[in-house]
């Protein structure tokens, strides 16, 4: 059965559904468009962050130092899911966060995409709070849990990869203090939407606390939202 990475209506990919065939250029094409979306939605700038798609025993991941809005298909490298970086036929090196991506795929067999972004409001949020809790129904439905904030750990380190793997096992996204956000999904659309929702919820809470105080959804309401037929439908569409 052909895997479908459903990009939903979030962006401009021709034909809506983008069916992933066996040709590597299709995986890379999706990543090129996904990277441009991160910049357009204000989730990062320049070369900040990294994205990947898993296919079989391989990962397609952004080359280190590549600007998202200038990236070409050749800037997304195929590397083994485990082992060394492999031969990519060029001088380009995979993102320094390769081990973090690998760690996510290792503990979450249900995911095919990892997005690491550098969104402004989420980073500010992590300076004040230790957990991102649901204020909106959409956040509760798509993220399904509160989102932990991980204290600062050096980017690209084994320590960061291990900490992310430990937390991502039970959550669909994390905020990395003084660093950024990481989200996972069965499809690029699902991972992107979760990234957007974390940034949006952070913004809502920070602005709410400027004028009064953020009003969080209680456990009973959140569970009702997560378990609803509507939420299940939304999540199913994002998965493809």
Image (cartoon, rainbow, N blue to C red):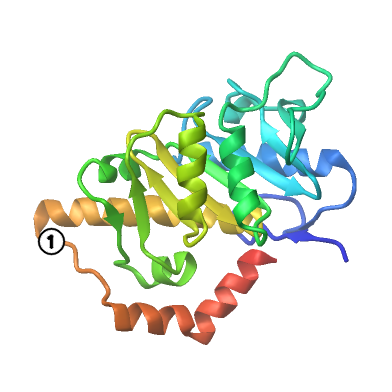
Question: Which corner quadrant of the image does residue 92 belong to?
Answer: top right
Which residue occupies 76% across, 33% down? 79
The answer to whether any part of residue 11 appears in the image is no
- 146 relative position to 83: left or right: left
Q: Residue at x 68, y 40 (%)?
A: 31
- Give the tally of numbered discs: 1
Q: Residue at x 13, y 61 (%)?
A: 213
Q: Quadrant of residue 72?
A: top right
Q: Is residue 126 above or below residue 226?
A: above
Looking at the rendered image, the quarter that the N terminus falls into is: bottom right
Look at the picture and state if 165 lies above or below 240.
above
- Work out whether 239 lies above or below 200: below
Give neighbour class at mark 1: few <14, some 14-19, many 20+ (Cα, 10 Å): few
The residue beneath circle 1 is 213
* Secondary element type, mark 1: loop
Q: Residue furthest top?
A: 91
Q: Foreground residue, 176 or 205? A: 176
Residue 54: image location, x then y, percent: 72, 47
> Is any part of residue 45 visible from this angle?
yes
**Residue 8 image position (x, y, % from top left):** 64, 61
Residue 91 occupies quadrant: top right
Say whether residue 45 is left or right of residue 113.
Answer: left
Residue 66 on image: x %, y % = 61, 23
Q: Quadrant of the C terminus?
A: bottom right
Residue located farthest toward the left when viewing the structure as drawn: 212
Name the residue: 40% across, 40% down: 119
Q: Position of residue 120 (x, y in %)?
A: 34, 38
């Amino acid at each position: 059965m052909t895997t479908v990475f459903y990009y939903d209506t979030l962006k401009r990919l021709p034909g809506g559904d983008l069916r992933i065939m066996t040709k590597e250029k299709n995986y890379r094409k999706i990543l090129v468009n996904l990277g441009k979306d991160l910049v357009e939605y204000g989730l990062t700038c320049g070369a900040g962050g990294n994205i990947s798609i898993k296919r079989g025993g391989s990962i397609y991941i952004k080359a280190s130092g590549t600007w998202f809005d200038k990236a070409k298909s050749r800037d997304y490298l195929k590397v083994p899911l485990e082992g060394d970086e492999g031969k990519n036929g060029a001088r380009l090196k995979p993102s320094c966060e390769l081990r973090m991506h690998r760690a996510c795929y290792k503990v979450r067999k249900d995911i095919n995409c990892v997005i690491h972004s550098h969104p402004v409001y989420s980073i500010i949020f992590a300076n004040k709070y230790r957990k991102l809790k649901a204020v909106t129904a959409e956040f509760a439905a798509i993220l399904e849990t509160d989102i932990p904030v991980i204290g600062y750990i050096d980017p690209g380190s084994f320590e960061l990869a291990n900490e992310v793997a430990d937390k991502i096992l039970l959550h669909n996204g994390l905020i990395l203090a003084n660093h950024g956000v990481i989200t996972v999904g069965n499809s690029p659309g699902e991972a992107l939407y979760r990234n957007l929702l974390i940034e949006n919820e952070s913004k809502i809470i920070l602005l709410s606390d400027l004028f009064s105080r953020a009003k969080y959804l209680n456990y009973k309401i959140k569970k009702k939202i997560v378990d609803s037929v509507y939420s299940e439908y939304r999540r199913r569409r994002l998965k493809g």
